[in-house]
Each structure stands twice: as C-alpha cells, then as structure tokens.
Image (cartoon, coloured by chain):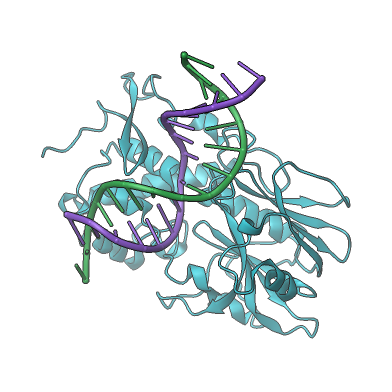
Chain colours: A cyan, B green, C purple
Amino acid sequence: MPELPEVETVRAGLADHVLGRTIAGVQVYRERAVRGQAGGPGAFADLLLGARIRAAVRRGKFCWLILEGSDGEPLDHALLAHLGMSGQLLVRSNPGGEHKHLRVRITMTDGSQVWFVDQRTFGYLQVAELVPTLDGLPGGYWGASRSTGLNEGELPDQLVPLSSVPFPVAHIARDLLDPVYAAGTPGRAALRRRMRASHREIKRVLLDQTVISGIGNIYADEALWRARVHYRRDTHKMRGAQLDAVLDAATAVMSQALEQGGTSFDALYVNVNGASGYFDRSLAVYGQRDRHCPRCGAMIVREAFMNRSSFLCRRCQRRPRG
DNA sequence: CTTCTGCCCTGGGAGC
DNA sequence: TGCTCCCAGGGCAGAA
C-alpha cells in the first residue's frame, strides 16, 4: 500500500536507474492501466517514444518523470504514475521477462526496462501536461540522485518543468516531508490554521491530499496512535500543540519507514528493484487487531470509518464526547 | 457553499 | 472443487 515513503523509495530508485535513458518502446497490456489519456494508449506511447528521462520527481503519492526531446529541450509533458494500492515500478536490466500482473512495459534504447506491475489496477500511468501548481510553489520533491550528481534542493536552470507539475497533481498539496512544513516554520503554522479552519475529524483531514499530501490509511493510524489522538477528534477543537503532535508523529513515522525502504505486507508492494520493504514489522496499530498496544497493553481494535478500517488503542486514544 | 456518503475499479483469501 | 462474500484505498459523483 504505497504511501509517501514507498513512493519516495520508488522515485529514488528510478532516479538512480533510468535518468538519461531514452525511451525506445512502449507496450500497454492493460488499457485501464493508462488512465485519463486523450487518445488512449496509442497516444500514450507516441508521446513517450524518443523522449529522454531527465529527472524523477514526487509530490505526495504522485511520482513523475521529467522528459526532454532529442534536441535536449524539456518537453511540456511528463510521465506520471500513481501506484494506487498495489502498483509497482520495477526496473529490469535484462530483456524479456514476464510477470503475472505486468500492465505496461517501457523499454529503453539500452535494453533496460521499466515495468508497471499492478495486481488490482487501481494505479495508473499517464503522460500529462505540465501546469503551474495551485499553491504557486515549485513542483515537487526531486531529491538526490547518484546518477546525475544532483543534490537535494539544487534546481538546475534547464529543468524548467520542475516549477510545474502534471495536471492531475495541480490540486495536490505539498507533503509532510517537505521542508516548508517543518516544525516551527511559518509553513507549519499556516498548515495548522488550515487544518483548524473547519469542523472536520482529524483523520479525514490527514487523508485529504489537498490539505497535506502523502498520508494514507496506514500512516494516519500510526500517527494518531503515537500522538494519542482519536481519529474522530474535531480539528477545530484541537489545540495547536495537539495538531503539531500529530503532524510530528506522522513526519516521524514516515521518515522511519523511508529509512527502511517503505512498508510492505506481502508481495503486493516491492520497491523499484523488487525488494520488499519491511517497515510493517514496526507498525504499532495498523493491521494489529487483537494484539496488544505496545504502549499500554490494551487490545488494539478495528473500527469502520470513512468506509475503511481504523485501528486504534481505545485506552490511549479516547473517543471525543458527542 | 462545504462536508460527507456511497460506490467503483480488481483479485485473492476465507468460508461454506 | 467452485461458488459467494468481503476486503483493500483513492477519487469522484452526487447527496445532504
């Protein structure tokens, strides 16, 4: 279940393995895996053929590859990926090869391949037009890359598309690992104000990708448990320090997951090279129904909320009245 | 207008 | 063995 740490792991893997490669072939095995594409899979392939991969960028759970033409000029579209629930991007250096759930195969001129593998096809690829962001801030996180020697925060002038994002990402907020939201910054204060601006339940707000991106069901539950906050707390009634505690907890749990290569439950999620992450062993509440709370020993319970599961410790996380 | 519910996509596992 | 039911999570249409 790829959330921010898993997608960042994929982005970093792509940055290390495919930058500078030129796309020579595109095979779409499942039409549904290319979504929102005017002209369908045919147009998808046409837009990619001959393009060179310039950078791997991420905002929240969206990841995209900046492309340039054979003349070295940046293209005004990018290859966008959303992994959904079970999507993987696998880099394969040997030609051929098969996978039961291989949906799209992209072959480079040197023979290396990027596979989009997705059992449930909730994820998708799309060649999307680059547009300015709604928040007016530069595109996304492009991070460090061993391949290019680019360091985090260095924005090469020629990568103009980094100041824009693919169209489907335009309404997505920056994510919690973004420096603009670091504790103690004006950006963090603005985020708190935004979260408190309406009467909404805290978990609903954490999952709202237009407020803060990158958090999914797993890390929302883990962050709320760490901060001892019930998922139904009304953000408008929460003190700033409590909101900060939740945001700090979410930052911490996702940072730890990122260090370990992302959460994984089974073969559904593996990183860009096919190696599973193992953060699931560190989960305190998510998926831990009927196990003991690591902090107080009470039983972890599962409750239905927003048509999905919420795992919590009812002793540590007291339900609000009313 | 804001907020929230219901439903969709797919495949696999549990239970009968 | 084969059938049905349920579940996963993000996004969106349409309701409240």
Above or below: residue A263 compared with residue A113: above
Above or below: residue A98 compared with residue B12: below
Above or below: residue A216 compared with residue A321: below
Figure quadrant of the C terminus of chain A? top left
Residue nearest the viewer, comparing A190 with A182: A190
x, y percentage for residue A170? 46, 72
Horizontal side, residue A280 vs residue A99: left or right? left
Residue drawn at (49%, 80%) of the image: A132
Q: Which image quadrant for residue A303?
A: top left
Above or below: residue A180 compared with residue B10: below
Q: Which image quadrant for residue A105?
A: bottom right
Residue nearest the viewer, comparing A208 with A137: A208
Report if residue A247 is visible in the image. Answer: yes
Q: Which image quadrant for residue A221?
A: top left
Residue farthest toward the left in the current orientation of the protein: A322
Horizontal side, residue A239 vs residue A22: left or right? left
Number of marks: 0
x, y percentage for residue A20? 78, 69
x, y percentage for residue A19? 75, 65
Residue drawn at (34%, 35%) of the image: A225
